[in-house]
Amino acid sequence: MLGARSLLGSLLALLLLGGGAIGLPASAVTAASTAGTTEQVSSKPKPDPRWVFYTKDKRRYTSPWFGGARRIMIPFGCTRAPYYSPDPRCKKDRGFHHGLDLAMPCGTRLWSDRYAWVVSGESLGPAYGETPLLLRNHKVGFDLVIGHVRKVYVDVGDRVRPGDLIARASDDGAPDGCHLHFERRAKNGGLDTAVRPREMLDLTAKRKQQQ
């Protein structure tokens, strides 16, 4: 028995080759020829139901670090997101987020946009997932923590350059769905040295297309 796609293909071939001969209008032939592509056009990645956005910023951003245009889930600094312990720097018993999270589907490609060396991330702990990336730039003096990744394409000791594919986003170690955690620290620094990473991400707000 022919599958649905095989049957549709056979019908399409008959319509295209003999539609005019059997008196079918051109609109019917055109409709049939586009039917097979409907599934492909409509099969866009759906939002992760676990995503929660703890910011009023609804813009989507592009960056040399990741593919597509993505929304910020949790910005750097004090946040009402429930994943962090109360921090004395914050009001209303809110926690402090030391990086910046951007929502993106699992498997989104991640590239380096800086020259850096890949160093061991074993000291980062499980909150960043099982295989977080720790990139270190000795000349400028910074560390970059890239959390919640899978399919890491680089190894400890590698030197990465702008444009190098380094990993893919995932939900590894993340209760709030697939996303990128991007964190900037001082070279060899701990969590308390984290600073606002947005400038290094080089985020550009995507303009809305005019209707």
Image (cartoon, grey):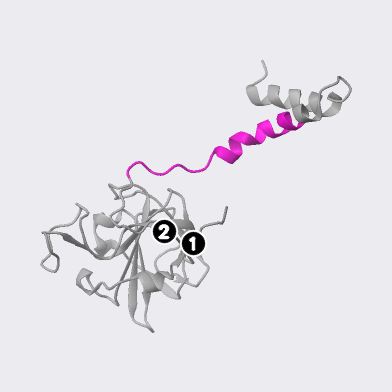
User: Camera-side residue: 64 or 28?
Assistant: 28
Single out the residue that lies furthest toward the top: 1
Residues at marks 1 and 2 touching, judged by CB atoms closer than 8 Å: yes
First in sequence: mark 1 vs mark 2: 2
Q: Position of residue 177 (x, y in %)?
A: 34, 47
Q: Is residue 115 above or below residue 49?
A: below
State left or right for residue 44 relative to residue 202. right
Number of labels in the image equals 2
Write the start and end of the magenta stretch as one range.
Answer: 30-50
Please check the rendered image and state whether residue 42 is part of the magenta-colored stretch, yes or no: yes
Q: Position of residue 90 (x, y in %)?
A: 14, 65
Indicate the amino acid at tag 1.
Answer: Lys
Cα distance, mark 1 to mark 2? 7 Å
Q: Secondary structure at mark 1?
A: loop
Report the disc number at residue 59: 2
Please tell me how crowded label 2 is: few (under 14), some (14-19), or many (20+) other residues with Cα within 10 Å: some
Q: Is residue 120 above or below residue 45?
A: below
Q: Position of residue 178 (x, y in %)?
A: 37, 49
Indicate the amino acid at tag 2.
Answer: Arg
State left or right for residue 13 relative to residue 91. right
Residue drawn at 57 percent across, 52 percent down = 211
Residue drawn at 51 percent across, 66 percent down = 164
Q: Position of residue 4 (x, y in %)?
A: 64, 22
Q: Mark 1 = which residue? A: 206
